[in-house]
Amino acid sequence: MNGFFTALRKYARFRGRSTRREYWQFMLVYLLITMALAVADRVLGLMVSPGSKAGLLGWLFTLSMLLPSLAVSIRRLHDRDLSAWFMLLGLIPLLGSAILLVLAALPGTRGDNRHGPDPLAEPETQA
């Protein structure tokens, strides 16, 4: 759950790198909250329209999390030393999302890359 709050602290920071742990913890908590809000929307009768699968609370949460989810995804790509433009792969039905899923699951590049220092590197101690 720490990864979720780390991603929220970096709300709209598109530079730098995110670890796999930060990314996946954010996505897991995001999914769980979305599911809980979907149930709450149904119970409270806050559906956007009759027969709709989208509720008011779910829409508000998704809208409020748009920037953090985009930012953590871009920083995850940066950890693989890839450009943010790779997010456009998500526009390709099914295949694009599968490619992004695989890229998010792969380990990041070791050491510094053009997007910043390795987030898993041990901080240097000064003597």
Image (cartoon, rainbow, N blue to C red):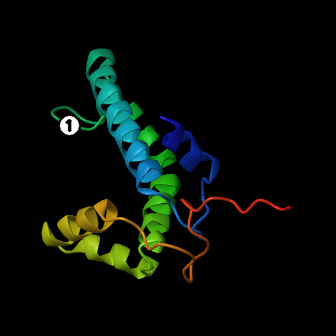
Please name whichever residue, 111 or 103, is drawn nearer the observer in this view of the structure: 111
Quadrant of the image containing the C terminus: bottom right
Residue 13 x %, y % = 61, 63
Residue 57 sits above or below residue 3 on the image: above
Residue 117 sits above or below residue 30 on the image: below
Please name whichever residue, 119 or 77, is drawn nearer the observer in this view of the structure: 119
Residue 56 x %, y % = 38, 34
The residue sitting at 62% across, 59% down in the picture is 122
The residue sitting at 52% across, 53% down in the picture is 68
Q: Amino acid at mark 1?
A: Lys
The residue sitting at 33% across, 21% down in the picture is 40
Quadrant hosting residue 111: bottom right
Instruction: Pick out the residue farthest to the front.
Output: 127
Relative placement, left or right, of 126 versus 58 is right
User: On the image, numbered disc 1 is attached to which residue?
Assistant: 53
Residue 79 sits above or below residue 18 on the image: below
Relative placement, left or right, of 43 versus 52 is right
Residue 43 x %, y % = 28, 16
